[in-house]
Image: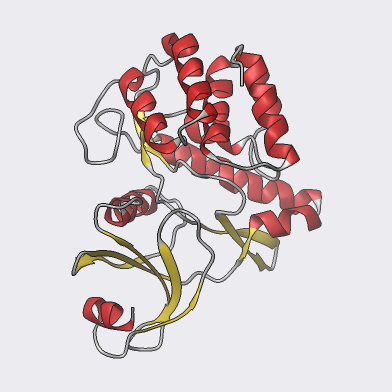
């Protein structure tokens, strides 16, 4: 890894300890030639995630005013994808939000609501993978679901949900930049004179050209994020987005099982 990073950044660049990450890429701390702190993601070419596509999405979000880590380099070296970003100081909102007061909660939620609005303004030519030929939503979302939901009962349930509610995939609002994995562990906050505030939105590996309501619907499943799981009770599209996300993950925790069962029942999908 040190040789790989040196090939990207030059002599003196080094990797250090492993960092958390479960999206298929190897994630390590690093330092640049001048000693600057970095985060280094790598993955073989042809294996998900597509790190160069993630770098492109992150830059598009930055240009829209979303706080994200600065990309230092994004290249393929010897059959390996490498995405190097600056290290952003802060703590995951998942750890912080249960212990802060209402005022700070509202301030961070307002910043995240602004993030959702800014992403909805980054229009895409059609639905699907960023940079791929654009497609209608009723083709792109099922194709994405089949790639991401594990085979077995989860994929069977996802197919039933899409078959039953496919008429909802009407492309309303057009395609926009969608983070695709916007939950409270991918939100970094740091303290300031006015309390905890948003520092960066991390992990753009799941980004795609999707519907404008996708990030908001899925974020609402998580504590400390804009919206509420109850929002899906009055909106079949939101419930469908949430159920598809639940089915992506083989999580046997009681909260995840309850969310999956509630949404499946709401949509009339046996699981």
Q: Nearer the viewer, residue 244 or 11?
A: 244
Identify which residue is drawn at 35% across, 51% down: 49
Q: Is residue 199 above or below residue 10?
A: above
Q: Position of residue 117 (x, y in %)?
A: 48, 37
The reply, left or right, for residue 84 in relation to residue 198 is left
User: Hey, which quadrant is residue 24 in on the image?
Assistant: bottom left
User: Hey, which quadrant is residue 268 in on the image?
Assistant: top right
User: Hey, which quadrant is residue 190 in on the image?
Assistant: bottom right
Q: Position of residue 27 (x, y in %)?
A: 44, 67
Identify which residue is drawn at 60% across, 54% down: 185
Identify which residue is drawn at 71% across, 46% down: 106
Seen as rendered, the residue at the extreme front is 152
Q: Nearer the viewer, residue 63 or 233?
A: 233
Can residue 48 be spotted in the picture? Answer: yes
Identify which residue is drawn at 31% across, 90% down: 12
The reply, left or right, for residue 242 in relation to residue 55 is right
Q: Position of residue 116 (x, y in %)?
A: 50, 39
Q: Nearer the viewer, residue 212 or 16?
A: 16
Q: Position of residue 66 (x, y in %)?
A: 45, 51
Q: Is residue 146 above or below residue 54?
A: above
Classify the position of the N terminus by image quarter: bottom left
Q: Is residue 196 above or below residue 11?
A: above
Classify the position of the C terminus by image quarter: top right
The reply, left or right, for residue 239 in relation to residue 63 is right
The reply, left or right, for residue 105 in relation to residue 54 is right
Can residue 37 be spotted in the picture? Answer: no
């Amino acid at each position: 890894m040190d040789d790989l990073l040196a090939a990207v950044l030059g002599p003196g660049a080094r990797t250090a300890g492993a960092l958390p990450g479960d999206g298929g890429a190897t994630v390590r701390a690093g330092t640049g030639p001048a000693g600057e702190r970095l985060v280094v993601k790598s993955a073989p070419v042809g294996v998900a995630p597509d790190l160069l596509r993630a770098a492109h999405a992150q830059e598009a979000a930055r240009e829209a005013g979303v706080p994200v880590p600065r990309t230092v380099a994004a290249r393929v070296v010897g059959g390996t994808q490498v995405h190097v970003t600056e290290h952003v100081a802060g703590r995951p909102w998942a750890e912080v939000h249960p212990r802060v007061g209402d005022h700070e909660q509202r301030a961070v939620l307002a910043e995240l609501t602004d993030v959702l609005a800014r992403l909805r303004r980054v229009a895409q030519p059609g639905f699907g993978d960023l940079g791929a030929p654009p497609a209608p939503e009723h083709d792109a979302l099922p194709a994405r679901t089949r790639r991401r939901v594990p085979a077995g009962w989860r994929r069977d349930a996802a197919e039933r949900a899409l078959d039953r509610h496919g008429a909802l995939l009407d492309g309303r609002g057009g395609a926009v930049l969608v983070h695709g994995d916007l939950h409270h562990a991918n939100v970094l906050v740091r303290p300031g004179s006015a309390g905890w505030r948003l520092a960066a939105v991390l992990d753009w590996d799941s980004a795609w050209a999707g519907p404008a309501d996708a990030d908001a619907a899925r974020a609402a499943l998580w504590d400390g994020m804009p919206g509420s799981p109850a929002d899906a009770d009055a909106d079949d599209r939101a419930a469908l987005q949430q159920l598809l996300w639940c089915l992506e993950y083989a999580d046997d925790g009681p909260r995840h099982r309850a969310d999956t069962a509630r949404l499946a029942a709401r949509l009339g999908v046996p699981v």
